[in-house]
Image: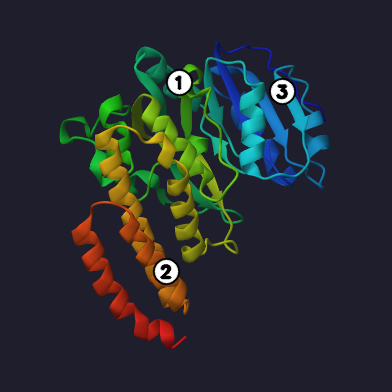
Amino acid sequence: MSMSEPAHQPSRASISVIVPTYNSARFIREALDSILAQRLQPEQIIVIDDGSTDNTADVVGRYKDRRIQYIRQPHAGVASARNAGLDAARGEYIAFLDAHDRWRPIFLEMLHGYLSEDPTAGSIFSNFVRFEHGTGKVLGDQFHSYPAIKRPVLLKDEPFAHGRIPKEKAFSTLVAFEDIPAYPQVMMFRRSMIEHLRFDASPGEDIGFALKAFLAGGVLFTDVVLAEVRCHANAAPDPLATALNKLDGLKAIEPHVTREGDRRAYRDRLVKEHIDAALLQTKAGKVRAGWRTYRDSFSIPGSSWRKLKGAMRMALAVPSGLAR
């Protein structure tokens, strides 16, 4: 079965959608169909096949829409695939969709509408829900993790609303979030503000890229659920690996953080991530590694009280770590 452009053409905008994929043949049709079902259509859809060994190429090849550009590269990881997409992108706005996720029909229309109206904004992110693969069970929406940007009471009954964080506050505000909003599949970027940025080929690449984008311009957000992110029951994230990846992602952006207010917020978050990772290492029985990670936090200026509390927490964690 081949798939082509619908007879009725929705309006289009200068948007490049980048779809990195690796052995996701069984999911990528849902992702591409969700792009083609958008009320506002992109001008370019770039599928970067990161060396898949399944029939991804055959699935993508069934689409006859001329906007879909299929690029295959040797397997190098999702950061490399996204960077290849950025190199090929021509649109004024950039969006990413992972091959196993999907957008709701107003995703591009809403994010493009808000972003195009504010020339000082470099990026926008939306709310999303996670769902279990196999059962389809919805696991809750992401904005419960962002209490700092809870919708004002006066807007609680509005079906659509969005907020704005100006450039001078964007990074320092968002780097302090417990769960940093760094999910590329629910973000849109103004290309002119991020065209010099690339994903780092190291763990934590999503956090690194998002935070660098937050340094480049104001940030918009909407709590409307616009995407669905697939979760696999047998692939629950390892808390220690997640913490270490987050720490690596934060370390990688240090040269980009130059404004003093941003540096204070960055250093405080970096200390926090050192302590969080150290505690998880210690509780996992890696006591020496945990103390090394904690000790590294003292090379970062400031956050004396956080470091002191970290020492007390580490002391409490050592007995359980030694018992492993």
Q: In terms of depth relative to the viewer, which is nearer, 15 or 253?
A: 253
Q: In terms of depth relative to the viewer, which is nearer, 230 or 275?
A: 275
Label tally: 3
- Choose top left, top right, bottom left or bottom right for residue 94: top right
Q: Is residue 28 above or below residue 137?
A: above
Disc 1 and disc 3: Cα gap in Å? 24 Å
Residue 171 as seen in the image, left or right of residue 231: left
> Which amino acid type corresponds to the residue marked 3 in the rendered image?
Ile
> Which amino acid type corresponds to the residue marked 1 in the rendered image?
Met
Q: Quadrant of the N terminus?
A: top right
x and y, in percent, of residue 57 in the image: 81, 36
> Which amino acid type corresponds to the residue marked 2 in the rendered image?
Arg
Q: Is residue 123 above or below residue 264?
A: above
Badge 1: few (under 14), some or many (20 or more) residues near its Cα, within 10 Å? some
Marks 1 and 3: CB-CB under 8 Å? Answer: no
Which SS class for mark 1? helix
Which dot marks residue 193? Answer: 1
x and y, in percent, of residue 229 in the image: 52, 45
Mark 3 — residue? 68
Badge 3: few (under 14), some or many (20 or more) residues near its Cα, within 10 Å? some
Residue at left offset 47%, top offset 76%: 286
Residue at left offset 52%, top offset 37%: 185
Mark 2 — residue? 292
Name the mark nearer the viewer: 2 or 3: 2
